[in-house]
Amino acid sequence: MQITDRIAIEDWELTEQFVRASGPGGQNVNKVATAVELRFEAARSPNLPDPVKSRLRRLAGRRWTKDGALVLQVDETRSQSRNREIARQRLAELIRAAAERPKRRIPTRPTLGSKKRRLSAKKARGTVKALRGRVEGED
Protein backbone atom coordinates (compact mmCIF):
# COMPACT_ATOMS: atom_id res chain seq x y z
CA MET A 1 0.00 0.00 0.00
CA GLN A 2 1.65 3.22 -1.20
CA ILE A 3 1.20 6.16 1.20
CA THR A 4 3.63 8.78 -0.10
CA ASP A 5 6.43 8.63 -2.64
CA ARG A 6 8.84 7.55 0.13
CA ILE A 7 6.56 5.53 2.42
CA ALA A 8 4.93 2.24 1.45
CA ILE A 9 3.37 -0.30 3.80
CA GLU A 10 3.81 -4.02 3.25
CA ASP A 11 0.88 -6.45 3.55
CA TRP A 12 2.44 -8.33 6.49
CA GLU A 13 2.30 -5.15 8.61
CA LEU A 14 -1.51 -5.01 8.37
CA THR A 15 -3.95 -7.44 9.95
CA GLU A 16 -7.69 -7.19 9.50
CA GLN A 17 -10.29 -8.70 11.72
CA PHE A 18 -13.99 -8.64 10.96
CA VAL A 19 -16.40 -8.31 13.88
CA ARG A 20 -20.13 -7.78 14.25
CA ALA A 21 -21.14 -4.17 13.90
CA SER A 22 -23.63 -2.22 15.97
CA GLY A 23 -26.14 0.13 14.44
CA PRO A 24 -28.36 -0.12 11.33
CA GLY A 25 -28.72 -3.34 9.39
CA GLY A 26 -31.69 -5.15 10.91
CA GLN A 27 -31.26 -8.88 11.34
CA ASN A 28 -28.21 -8.68 9.10
CA VAL A 29 -26.28 -7.16 12.03
CA ASN A 30 -26.64 -10.35 14.04
CA LYS A 31 -25.49 -12.63 11.22
CA VAL A 32 -22.72 -10.89 9.29
CA ALA A 33 -19.44 -9.50 10.60
CA THR A 34 -19.23 -6.23 8.66
CA ALA A 35 -17.19 -4.05 11.01
CA VAL A 36 -13.45 -3.97 10.29
CA GLU A 37 -10.69 -3.75 12.87
CA LEU A 38 -7.48 -2.81 11.04
CA ARG A 39 -4.26 -3.28 13.01
CA PHE A 40 -1.01 -1.72 11.79
CA GLU A 41 2.21 -2.70 13.58
CA ALA A 42 3.64 0.83 13.41
CA ALA A 43 6.41 0.50 16.02
CA ARG A 44 7.89 -2.53 14.26
CA SER A 45 7.47 -1.14 10.74
CA PRO A 46 10.80 -0.85 8.88
CA ASN A 47 9.22 1.48 6.32
CA LEU A 48 8.40 4.32 8.72
CA PRO A 49 11.20 6.66 9.85
CA ASP A 50 11.46 7.27 13.62
CA PRO A 51 10.23 10.91 13.52
CA VAL A 52 7.15 9.80 11.56
CA LYS A 53 6.51 7.03 14.12
CA SER A 54 6.62 9.47 17.02
CA ARG A 55 4.30 11.95 15.27
CA LEU A 56 1.95 9.08 14.34
CA ARG A 57 1.85 7.97 17.96
CA ARG A 58 0.86 11.48 19.04
CA LEU A 59 -1.80 11.74 16.32
CA ALA A 60 -3.23 8.28 17.02
CA GLY A 61 -3.96 8.97 20.68
CA ARG A 62 -6.09 6.19 22.22
CA ARG A 63 -5.88 4.12 19.03
CA TRP A 64 -2.19 3.41 19.78
CA THR A 65 -1.71 0.22 21.83
CA LYS A 66 0.95 -0.53 24.44
CA ASP A 67 2.76 -2.88 22.08
CA GLY A 68 3.08 -0.15 19.42
CA ALA A 69 0.22 -1.02 17.09
CA LEU A 70 -2.30 1.37 15.59
CA VAL A 71 -5.86 -0.02 15.70
CA LEU A 72 -8.61 1.50 13.56
CA GLN A 73 -12.19 0.28 13.87
CA VAL A 74 -14.74 1.10 11.16
CA ASP A 75 -18.40 0.12 11.14
CA GLU A 76 -19.90 2.99 9.14
CA THR A 77 -21.51 1.01 6.34
CA ARG A 78 -23.32 -2.32 6.04
CA SER A 79 -20.76 -3.50 3.50
CA GLN A 80 -17.65 -5.29 4.74
CA SER A 81 -15.60 -4.33 1.68
CA ARG A 82 -16.55 -0.64 1.95
CA ASN A 83 -15.64 -0.58 5.66
CA ARG A 84 -12.31 -2.17 4.74
CA GLU A 85 -11.62 0.56 2.15
CA ILE A 86 -12.54 3.31 4.66
CA ALA A 87 -10.20 1.83 7.29
CA ARG A 88 -7.29 1.71 4.81
CA GLN A 89 -8.00 5.29 3.68
CA ARG A 90 -8.00 6.52 7.30
CA LEU A 91 -4.72 4.76 7.97
CA ALA A 92 -3.16 6.35 4.88
CA GLU A 93 -4.43 9.81 5.90
CA LEU A 94 -3.04 9.41 9.42
CA ILE A 95 0.38 8.38 8.11
CA ARG A 96 0.39 11.24 5.56
CA ALA A 97 -0.40 13.71 8.35
CA ALA A 98 2.42 12.24 10.47
CA ALA A 99 4.83 12.39 7.53
CA GLU A 100 4.48 16.17 7.27
CA ARG A 101 7.17 17.85 9.29
CA PRO A 102 5.61 20.59 11.47
CA LYS A 103 6.72 24.15 10.94
CA ARG A 104 9.37 25.28 13.39
CA ARG A 105 8.05 28.07 15.55
CA ILE A 106 10.15 31.19 15.49
CA PRO A 107 9.68 33.02 18.79
CA THR A 108 8.90 36.72 18.41
CA ARG A 109 9.18 39.55 20.90
CA PRO A 110 6.18 41.71 21.80
CA THR A 111 6.19 45.21 20.29
CA LEU A 112 6.65 48.31 22.42
CA GLY A 113 3.06 49.37 21.69
CA SER A 114 1.65 46.03 22.86
CA LYS A 115 3.69 46.26 26.07
CA LYS A 116 2.33 49.76 26.77
CA ARG A 117 -1.27 48.68 26.03
CA ARG A 118 -0.90 45.70 28.38
CA LEU A 119 0.49 47.84 31.20
CA SER A 120 -2.16 50.55 30.81
CA ALA A 121 -4.90 47.87 30.89
CA LYS A 122 -3.37 46.41 34.06
CA LYS A 123 -3.22 49.87 35.62
CA ALA A 124 -6.88 50.55 34.76
CA ARG A 125 -7.94 47.19 36.19
CA GLY A 126 -5.94 47.90 39.35
CA THR A 127 -7.68 51.25 39.90
CA VAL A 128 -11.10 49.60 39.44
CA LYS A 129 -10.22 47.03 42.06
CA ALA A 130 -8.79 49.69 44.41
CA LEU A 131 -12.11 51.59 44.30
CA ARG A 132 -13.99 48.49 45.52
CA GLY A 133 -12.81 48.98 49.10
CA ARG A 134 -14.94 49.94 52.09
CA VAL A 135 -16.31 53.47 51.90
CA GLU A 136 -15.42 55.61 54.92
CA GLY A 137 -17.08 58.76 56.18
CA GLU A 138 -20.65 57.91 55.13
CA ASP A 139 -22.44 57.27 58.45
Image (tube, rainbow, N blue to C red):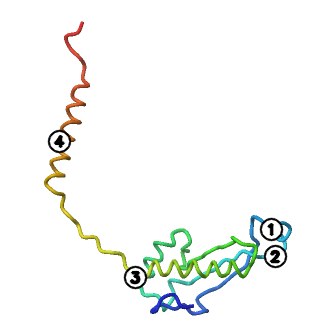
Q: Earlier in the sequence, mark 1 or mark 3?
A: 1
Give the CA separation, mark 1 to mark 4: 64 Å
In the image: residue 3, left or right of residue 52: right
**Residue visible at 74% across and 70% down in the picture:** 21
The extreme top residue here reads 139
**Label 3 CA crowd tier, 10 Å (few <14, some 14–19, many 20+):** few
Q: Earlier in the sequence, mark 3 or mark 4?
A: 3
Q: Which mark is residue 25?
A: 1
**Residue visible at 21% across and 35% down in the picture:** 126
Q: Amino acid at mark 3?
A: Pro
Q: Amino acid at mark 4?
A: Ser
Q: Is residue 122 above or below residue 133?
A: below
**Residue visible at 56% across and 72% down in the picture:** 63
Q: Earlier in the sequence, mark 4 or mark 2?
A: 2
Q: Earlier in the sequence, mark 2 or mark 3?
A: 2
Instruction: Tell me whether the residue at label 3 lies in contact with that at label 4, contact meaning CB atoms closer than 8 angstroms.
Output: no
Name the image quarter holding residue 19. Answer: bottom right
Kindly identify which residue carries mark 3: 51
Report the quarter where the C terminus lies. Answer: top left
User: Is disc 1 placed on a helix, strand or loop?
Assistant: loop
Q: Amino acid at mark 1?
A: Gly
Q: Which mark is residue 83?
A: none
Kindly identify which residue carries mark 2: 32
Give the CA separation, mark 1 to mark 2: 10 Å
**Residue visible at 78% across and 76% down in the picture:** 33
Q: Earlier in the sequence, mark 1 or mark 2?
A: 1
Q: Nearer the viewer, mark 4 or mark 2?
A: 4
User: Is disc 3 placed on a helix, strand or loop?
Assistant: helix
Q: Nearer the viewer, mark 1 or mark 2?
A: 1
